[in-house]
Image (cartoon, rainbow, N blue to C red):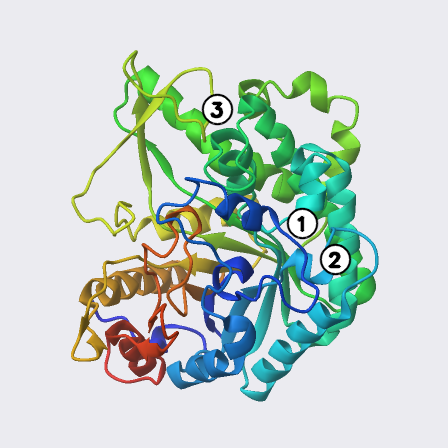
């Protein structure tokens, strides 16, 4: 590989991405309300190691230290999420000024360091009060989200370079309401498709709310896209890949970018009769003009038909079982296959639908079982992972694809959802006892790469 910083435009966004519940901590500070993840994490057996995000990385109190780390690494952008319960503790009503003040301090610190702020409005921490009223299965949650989006965008205004409405609505809908593996931990099967629709409606309502507060705002959405390749050319394998591609990609891409739901996915989820009364009006809202699309990319799926022994995938609620196959022995600590070329495929998914839209990789990274040796973390596997995916990004640009940014998941090791503290993704190691930060070898490599040093 000979990828170099010089293979990218001078204004390319190089950043890291984080999420509020995963790194902020301070869950009972300054008027913050309770989120669905607070409740879920405290539920017996919900989290792999029994931990919670109550402290996490304590980014709430250490954000200046973390911003300095970003600057030292040579990053020019930071994607963070705003905790809805910090702004509206019960999900509606007047803003909690202390919550807004925290994010203003963060944005000001980023500006002082020359780092552009990419603010995600929803990275899964729904106020529990709204979940008690039905959560994303209730249409009114979309309206509440638009109100919240307007409050935050008016308060932070031009300090935020780019706004992202939702992070990975597939996870919110299907891991949260179908599989029960994420908060709020519900298992309603195909009814989770209704949560997906309300999430997309919330996105569409939030876009004009943000623009009303800041007419010059740059607004987009982040989707987790995964190429779904049939294991063989057998009709049953091709059909399995179609269903998975529909649920993970087209259900979200198509309404945002083309103003229509794919008919086959509506049929798979049995949404037709339920959607019919509001479908056309809702789709017009969901397709509100946006300025960019963010993609979270981690791996490619190879899919085949299941058999009578296949355990149902609750996160993919279709009538016929499917099975996921491995095509490589190279895997991360999450068990995810390492497939860098898939990053070009997902960029193409967006570009084929809307060629004029800029695209950013808003998450890409790898968990490894890091070890400290003499005070250092020699994470060669992560460095190689990043190098290969940055190389794929360079090749995407060479092919004429409109890639404008790449954000690494994540800056610091953090609380990794249902895995708790058992998985480490960071460029910077966190000692969860002392909260001391140590830049790993991968972070040092990235700093050299961004400084324009030797080719990777």
Residue 321, above or below 45: above
Residue 77, above or below 22: below
The reply to whether discs 2 and 3 touch (Cβ–Cβ < 8 Å) is no
The C terminus sits in image quarter: bottom left
Residue 225, above or below 76: above
Q: Nearer the viewer, residue 274 or 226?
A: 274
Q: What is the secondary structure assignment of the residue under circle 1?
A: loop
The reply to whether discs 2 and 1 touch (Cβ–Cβ < 8 Å) is yes
Which of marks 3 and 2 precedes in the sequence? 2
Q: What is the secondary structure assignment of the residue under circle 2?
A: loop
Q: Position of residue 368 (x, y in %)?
A: 25, 58
Residue 113, above or below 280: below
Q: Residue at x 76, y 60 (%)?
A: 210
Q: Where is residue 190 in the image (x, y as percent from the top left)?
A: 55, 23
To which residue does mark 3 refer?
317
Q: Which of 196 and 333 is in front in this view?
A: 333
Task: Name the residue furthest top.
Answer: 308
To which residue does mark 1 refer?
127
To which residue does mark 2 refer?
88
The answer, for residue 287, to whether it is visible in the render is: no
Q: Which residue is drawn at 35% across and 49% down?
A: 49
Image mark for residue 31? none
Q: Which residue is drawn at 43% across and 26% down?
A: 242
């Amino acid at each position: 590989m000979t990828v170099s910083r010089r293979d990218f435009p001078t204004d390319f966004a190089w950043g890291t991405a984080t999420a509020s519940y995963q790194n902020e901590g301070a869950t009972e500070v300054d008027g913050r309300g309770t989120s669905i993840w607070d409740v879920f994490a405290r539920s017996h057996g919900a989290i792999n190691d029994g931990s919670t995000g109550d402290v996490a990385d304590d980014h709430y109190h250490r954000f200046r230290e973390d911003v300095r780390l970003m600057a030292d690494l040579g990053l020019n952008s930071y994607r963070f999420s705003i905790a809805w319960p910090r702004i509206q503790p019960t999900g509606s009503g007047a803003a909690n000024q202390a919550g807004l003040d925290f994010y203003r301090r963060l944005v000001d610190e980023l500006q002082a360091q020359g780092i552009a702020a990419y603010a995600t409005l929803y990275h899964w921490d729904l106020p529990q009060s709204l979940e008690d009223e039905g959560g994303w299965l209730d249409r009114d949650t979309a309206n509440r989200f638009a109100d919240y989006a307007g409050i935050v965008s008016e308060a932070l205004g031009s300090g935020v370079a780019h706004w992202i409405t939702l992070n990975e609505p597939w996870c919110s809908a299907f891991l949260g309401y179908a599989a029960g593996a994420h908060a709020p931990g519900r298992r309603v099967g195909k009814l989770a498709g209704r949560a997906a629709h309300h999430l997309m409606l919330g996105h569409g309502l939030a876009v004009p709310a943000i623009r009303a507060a800041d007419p010059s705002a740059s607004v987009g959405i982040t989707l987790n896209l995964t190429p779904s390749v049939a294991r063989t050319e057998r009709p049953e394998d091709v059909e399995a890949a179609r269903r998975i591609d529909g649920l993970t990609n087209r259900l979200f891409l198509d309404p945002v970018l083309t103003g229509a739901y794919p008919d086959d996915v509506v049929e798979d989820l049995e949404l037709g009769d339920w959607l019919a009364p509001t479908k056309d009006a809702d789709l017009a809202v969901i397709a509100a003009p946006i300025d960019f699309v963010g993609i979270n990319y981690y791996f490619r799926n190879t899919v085949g038909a299941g058999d009578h022994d296949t355990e149902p995938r609750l996160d993919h609620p279709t009538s016929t079982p499917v099975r996921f196959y491995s095509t490589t022995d190279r895997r991360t600590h999450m068990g995810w296959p390492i497939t860098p070329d898939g990053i070009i495929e997902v960029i193409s998914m967006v570009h084929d639908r809307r060629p004029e839209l800029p695209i950013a990789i808003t998450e890409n990274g790898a968990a490894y079982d890091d070890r400290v040796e003499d005070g250092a973390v020699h994470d060669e596997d992560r460095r190689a992972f990043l190098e290969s995916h940055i190389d794929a990004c360079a090749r995407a640009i060479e092919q004429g694809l409109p890639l404008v940014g790449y954000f690494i998941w994540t800056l610091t090791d953090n609380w990794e959802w249902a895995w708790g503290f058992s998985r480490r993704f960071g460029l910077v190691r966190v000692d969860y006892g002392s909260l001391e930060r140590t830049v790993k070898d991968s972070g040092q490599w990235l700093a050299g790469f961004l400084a324009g040093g030797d080719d990777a």
